[in-house]
Amino acid sequence: MEGWNQTTSGFFLLGLFPPTKIGLLLFLLVILIFLIAFLGNSTMILLIWMDHHLHTPMYFLLSQLSLMDLMYICSTVHKMAVNFLSGDSSISLVACGFQSFCFLLIASGEGLLLASMAIDRYVAICQPLHYPILMNKRMCLLMISVSWVSSSINSIFHTVYALSMPYCKSRIINHFFCDIPAMVPLACMDTWAYEYTVFFSTYLFLFVPFLGIMASYGRVLYAVYHMRSSQGKKKAFTTCSTHLTVVSFYYAPFVYTYLRPPSLCSLEEDKNFSIFYTILTPMLNPIIYSLRNKEVLGALQRLFGKCLFQKK
């Protein structure tokens, strides 16, 4: 009970960089990445909302991906920056719970959202005549609702349970945000049952959607290979390769971090790998989708052209 009373004041985060000149340089690099990610995802959301040419199921789902990436990077980098600049590594219990909830919400929801985007591409390429019927507004809202609601339930369960555990070993979390796998080893109780629950949850929200994504794109690539039109084949392949690039950036570090056997896990290694899906991926996603997408580039040109015209 004494250990639990200690947690009422919160935790301490070791952070990502040491308080040295090199650490400051790396910190400034992260801030630059944060600004690019914030600007890129905000621009994608604004473009999709304002340009009627992008009011399609694919871009509606893409706007949700940008929103998730925006929440991802804002919920983790902000506190890390404050702690690094102030020299105070503490985080309150409420703030820690909020970070854990946001991280789990986006981590589990983004996997389901990427699966929804894969299904959208499958229907568009393999069943184009039925696309307006199968991928209507109601279906898009249903896909998005499933992603947000199911991931919210999962996040609430894990956050509440993690914060209710007695922490009497230490309150120092070897991470730059409140990641539950980094918090569990600090508990002064047997956590093997909960660790299996975390593994099952990760399997359900990461591996199962991944199988759906691979099945959808496998069928899509088969259909693209048998297309007669070289132009249609090139367009379909460009779209699918863009999506698969995003999927690879998202899944590779997650699978390595959360689906490894416990005996091979390293908190320091997990912290370093988390940079990919909390900082780098939110920056890369809007860049990948904009640079390789003529419709997005066209919407961007129309938006800037309209702004310049209004100024004149």
Image (cartoon, rainbow, N blue to C red):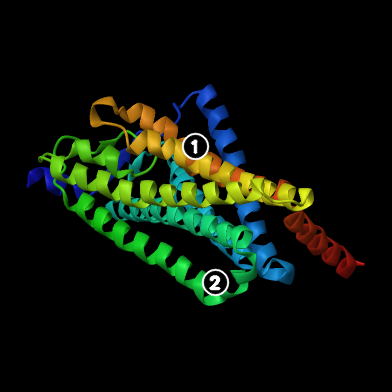
Expressed as whole percent of the image width and height from the top left, the position of residue 104 reads 36, 52
Expressed as whole percent of the image width and height from the top left, the position of residue 129 reads 64, 69
Q: Secondary structure at mark 1?
A: helix
Measure the alpha-carbon separation of dots 1 and 2: 34 Å
Left or right of residue 145: residue 93:
left
Expressed as whole percent of the image width and height from the top left, the position of residue 127 reads 60, 64
Left or right of residue 69: residue 148:
left
Disc 2 crowd rating (10 Å Cα; few below 14, some 14-19, many 20+) is some
Q: Residue at x 30, y 58 (%)?
A: 154
Disc 1 crowd rating (10 Å Cα; few below 14, some 14-19, many 20+) is some
Residue at the disc numbered 2:
134
Q: Residue at x 37, y 46 (%)?
A: 207
Expressed as whole percent of the image width and height from the top left, the position of residue 162 reads 22, 50
Q: Residue at x 79, y 58 (%)?
A: 298
Amino acid type indicated by mark 1: Phe
Between residues 202 and 158, which one lies in front from this camera angle? 202
- Foreground: disc 1 or disc 2: 2
- Disc sitting over residue 276 in the figure: 1
Q: Residue at x 46, y 71 (%)?
A: 142
How many numbered callouts? 2
- Mark 1 vs 2, N-terminal side: 2
